[in-house]
């Protein structure tokens, strides 16, 4: 190597060293707030540096922290009418700013959205906060901008509805009117891989993930005011026939069920970039026909519905690596074929929509110390219940029934998890009600 080249490399190294030292005021701590609607939220770092937050999006504390120093972000004052929780909030400063703190605030759960596969429509309902009953919003059902809608998700701010269209290989975006629940199209649908089957927004509301069942891949899009832009490297290869997606509450890891492999593929998520990389030990074994995955609100346990295996797999989650460790007694045998799973916001109960002869919704109590499941209640559903969702308050559960084209609604006993059918249930939807999402 010639002398000039050596000096060039040395200069570059010195430049990097200077940049890494972050001379002048230490490293900053920040992240993203989602779901905030009330006023008065105050965050605090290390019980001293306070920051008032007025809206959703990025935040950053004003004081810097030197390398090796500790940070600990907490909620000093909750906003009016809401509860906010901090994830990725504590650690030690390395050689970069901290920008992955996630603060999620509870949503009111005012509306439910059901995608109807054969009628190519989306049914929108308002939810009675006292009874859990559903009422169609004005203009419902809304025409789908894609063909064969099969899955839906509401972003953490309750602003947009994203719908995966299986036959047109697209994702549609709809703006949600916060006062009425009506939907408005947001431009042309974004192209995905072949056979999109599931859709997910990360907790920080930065990225959208789509499981492409036919392609055995996951498409990743950055989100900007509901506009989707596919990131570099997308789509990413996963196991055969991916059918569902979940992240831990902090958005550090992505989990994808593989129906054909009977396993769960686990990935780390690059902060701020959204790209995914397989973690050590992945894929993790589940049961045959792994179809749906749910993670408890603390990020401690994961559960997988194995449709053809007639079972539920149970795991603990290594919060440092994202690895899944099977729990004692896993898989747990079920009487029917579990299709969809949901954990209530307090982490007390797991609900499973069961098809075949059962056509019911089952409630399992979660043992906090072990993650073990105990069946506590079952209630009849419609024909071929495929998707279950729980409102943010944990009071009501809703199931989209494909063959009867309707929605079953239940109240959840806060102590026992027992299910009681809501008066007026089931509520008519469109043809082949496939998936349900709650704002």
Image (cartoon, rainbow, N blue to C red):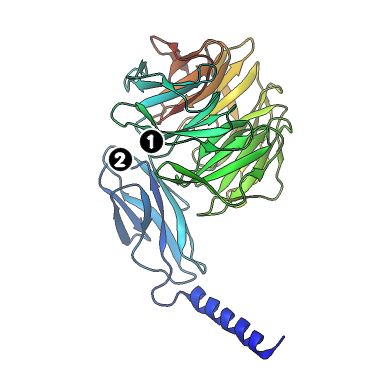
Residue at 64% x, 88% y: name it: 4
Dot 1 crowding, Cα within 10 Å, few <14, some 14–19, many 20+: many
146 vs 22: above or below? above
- Give whichever of 38, 180 is nearer the camera: 180
Residue at 47% x, 25% y: name it: 144
Reading the image, the residue beneath label 1 is 158
Residue 293 in view here? no
Residue 264, picture quadrant: top right
Q: Earlier in the sequence, mark 2 or mark 1?
A: 2
Residue 19 location (% of width, % of height):
49, 75
Residue 173, picture quadrant: top left
Residue 401 location (% of width, % of height):
53, 15
Reading the image, the residue beneath label 2 is 37
252 vs 435: above or below? below
- Give whichever of 167, 72 is nearer the camera: 167
Residue 407 location (% of width, % of height):
47, 15
Local secondary structure at mark 1: loop
Report the quarter where the N terminus lies: bottom right
220 vs 141: above or below? below
- Give whichever of 333, 154 is nearer the camera: 154
Report the quarter where the C terminus lies: top left
Dot 2 crowding, Cα within 10 Å, few <14, some 14–19, many 20+: many
Disc number for residue 433: none
Residue at 37% x, 41% y: name it: 35
User: Mark 2–mark 1 contact, CB under 8 Å?
Assistant: yes
Which residue of the protein is positioned furthest toward the bottom in this rendering?
Answer: 3
Local secondary structure at mark 2: loop
Camera-near label (2 vs 1) is 1
Residue 306 location (% of width, % of height):
67, 26
């Amino acid at each position: 190597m010639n002398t000039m080249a050596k000096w060039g490399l040395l200069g570059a190294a010195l430049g990097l060293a200077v940049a890494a030292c972050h001379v002048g005021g230490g490293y900053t701590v920040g992240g993203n707030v989602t779901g905030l609607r009330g006023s008065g939220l105050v965050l605090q770092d290390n019980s001293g540096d306070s920051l008032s937050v007025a809206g959703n999006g990025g935040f950053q504390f004003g004081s810097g922290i030197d390398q090796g120093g500790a940070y600990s972000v907490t909620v000093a004052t909750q906003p009016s009418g809401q509860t906010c929780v901090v994830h990725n909030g504590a650690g030690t400063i390395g050689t970069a700013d901290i920008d992955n703190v996630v603060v999620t605030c509870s949503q009111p759960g005012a509306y439910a959205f059901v995608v109807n596969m054969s009628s190519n429509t989306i049914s929108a309902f308002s939810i009675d906060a006292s009874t859990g009953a559903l009422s169609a919003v004005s203009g419902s059902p809304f025409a789908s901008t894609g063909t064969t809608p099969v899955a839906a998700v509401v972003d953490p701010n309750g602003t947009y509805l994203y719908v995966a269209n299986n036959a047109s290989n697209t994702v549609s975006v709809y703006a949600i009117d916060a006062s009425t629940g009506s939907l408005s199209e947001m431009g042309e649908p974004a192209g995905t891989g072949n056979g999109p089957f599931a859709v997910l927004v990360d907790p920080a509301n930065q990225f959208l993930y789509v499981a492409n069942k036919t392609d055995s891949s996951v498409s990743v899009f950055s989100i900007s005011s509901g506009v989707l832009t596919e990131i570099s490297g997308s789509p990413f290869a996963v196991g055969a026939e991916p059918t569902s997606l979940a992240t831990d509450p902090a958005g550090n890891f992505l989990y994808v069920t593989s129906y054909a492999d009977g396993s769960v593929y686990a990935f780390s998520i690059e902060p701020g970039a959204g790209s995914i990389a397989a973690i050590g030990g992945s894929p993790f074994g589940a049961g045959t026909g792994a179809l749906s995955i749910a993670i408890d609100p603390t990020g401690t346990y994961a559960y997988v519905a194995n449709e053809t295996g007639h079972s539920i797999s149970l795991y603990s989650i290594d919060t440092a690596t994202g690895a899944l460790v099977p729990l004692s007694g896993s898989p747990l045998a079920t009487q029917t074929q579990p299709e969809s799973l949901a954990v209530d916001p307090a982490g007390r109960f797991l609900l499973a929509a069961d098809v075949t002869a059962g056509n019911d919704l089952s409630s399992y109590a979660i043992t906090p110390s072990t993650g073990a499941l105990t069946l506590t209640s079952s209630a009849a559903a419609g024909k071929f219940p495929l998707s279950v969702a729980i409102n943010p308050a944990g009071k009501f559960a809703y199931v989209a029934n494909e063959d009867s084209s309707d929605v079953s609604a239940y109240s959840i006993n806060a102590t026992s998890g027992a299910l009681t059918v809501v008066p007026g249930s089931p509520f008519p939807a469109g043809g082949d009600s496939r998936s349900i999402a709650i704002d």
